[in-house]
Image (cartoon, helix red, strand yellow):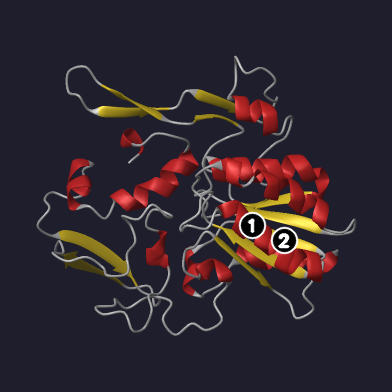
Amino acid sequence: MRAYLPGTDQRIRFLSPGYLVAPAVLERIGAVDGTDRIPLTLQFDDGRTEIVELAPMKGEDPGDERKASLNRGYSVLIPDDPDLPGRWRHLLDGRKELPPIYGKRSDVQARFLDDHMKVLYIRNDTARSIDETPLPDKLAGVVLDKIVPMQPKHIIVDLRLNNGGDFFNTILFSRAIPRLVPRDGRVFVLVGRATFSAGITTAAMLKGEGGDKVTLIGEPMGDGGQFWSEGKYVKLPNSRIAVRYSPQFHDYETGCFDIDDCYWATVAFGPRGISIAPEITVELSFRAYAEGRDPVQEKVLDLAGRH
């Protein structure tokens, strides 16, 4: 799909699976000869392989939120509710005590990962609210309900499924979190290929505010420390097709100092002179996923136990 998708390698890794379920796309890239039947080679645990043919479906998976704006199809990785009519069987069916990253998509979720309430896990899947309650109010609620009264030693902020939104919603949160852990505490920011746009900015603001107290863990994100965003549309003169372009520049590596060169909000609020590359790289393998494990969270809990 590389010839048809924009962005970095990580961005293409994130976007491409959503296109590879379309028979017309498979035919266009030369993976199949036609769209009536799609051959799929399966490899089983015992090493044997089998080729099956899949026909296009007339209906849709009732649990697939691919068309929703939240996480662009990642919902298929999560088992549907058992009572959902027409529910498809799932690889993780029967797995108990799944890590929180395998829960249903949302905007903000928070829970403690230990009995002593010293490790607080916050998952932020989008930089905008999915309902009428503003996102800053939800993030403030986490601070007031869990951080202030419980005073956790370590805070995990999981941005691995945060594909963006409006980083104005996370500015105060990003500046507050590193200041609210104790001096001997840590902030672990979980990132991955789906972390993009305002999700990247949120991770960068956390790192810029907390410095060495904040550790980025996971995969490289969907863009680098210098990127263009804040998209607008222009209609092509002949076809009248609307094309989206990004006119505003972000630079967290050297820093933005002039609004003539950078997006004004990045000049005002963005970090300067930091790297957004993960300090500790941990990728999620298919085997770990099939076992219902989260190696990134496991690594973080190991690190938290050392501090």
Dot 2, crowdedness within 10 Å: few (<14), some or many (≥20)?
some
Question: Which of the image's four quarters has the C terminus?
Answer: bottom right
Residue 139 spot, x, y in % from top left: 64, 57
Residue 188 spot, x, y in % from top left: 72, 56
Q: Is residue 242 visible?
A: yes
| 146 relative position to 244: left or right | right
User: 105 above or below 217?
Assistant: below
Q: Residue visible at 58% across and 35% down?
A: 224
Question: Which structural element holds mark 1?
Answer: helix
| 129 relative position to 279: left or right | left
Q: Is residue 303 visible?
A: no
Of residues 211 and 85, which is closer to you in this image?
A: 85
Q: Residue visible at 84% across and 59% down?
A: 185
Question: Which of the image's four quarters has the N terminus?
Answer: top left
Question: Which structural element holds mark 2?
Answer: helix
Of residues 158 and 279, which is closer to you in this image?
A: 158
Residue 288 spot, x, y in % from top left: 53, 69
Residue 219 spot, x, y in % from top left: 58, 50
Of residues 117 and 215, which is closer to you in this image?
A: 117
What is the C-alpha distance between the residues marked 1 and 2? Answer: 7 Å
**For residue 55, which numbered disc appears in the image?**
none
Residue 257 occupies quadrant: top right
Q: Residue visible at 51% across and 48% down?
A: 193
Residue wearing tag 2: 143
| 267 relative position to 83: left or right | right
| 159 relative position to 175: left or right | left
Residue wearing tag 1: 139
Q: Amino acid at mark 2?
A: Val
Q: Residue furthest right?
A: 183
Q: Amino acid at mark 1?
A: Leu
Q: Are marks 1 and 2 in contact (CB under 8 Å)?
A: yes
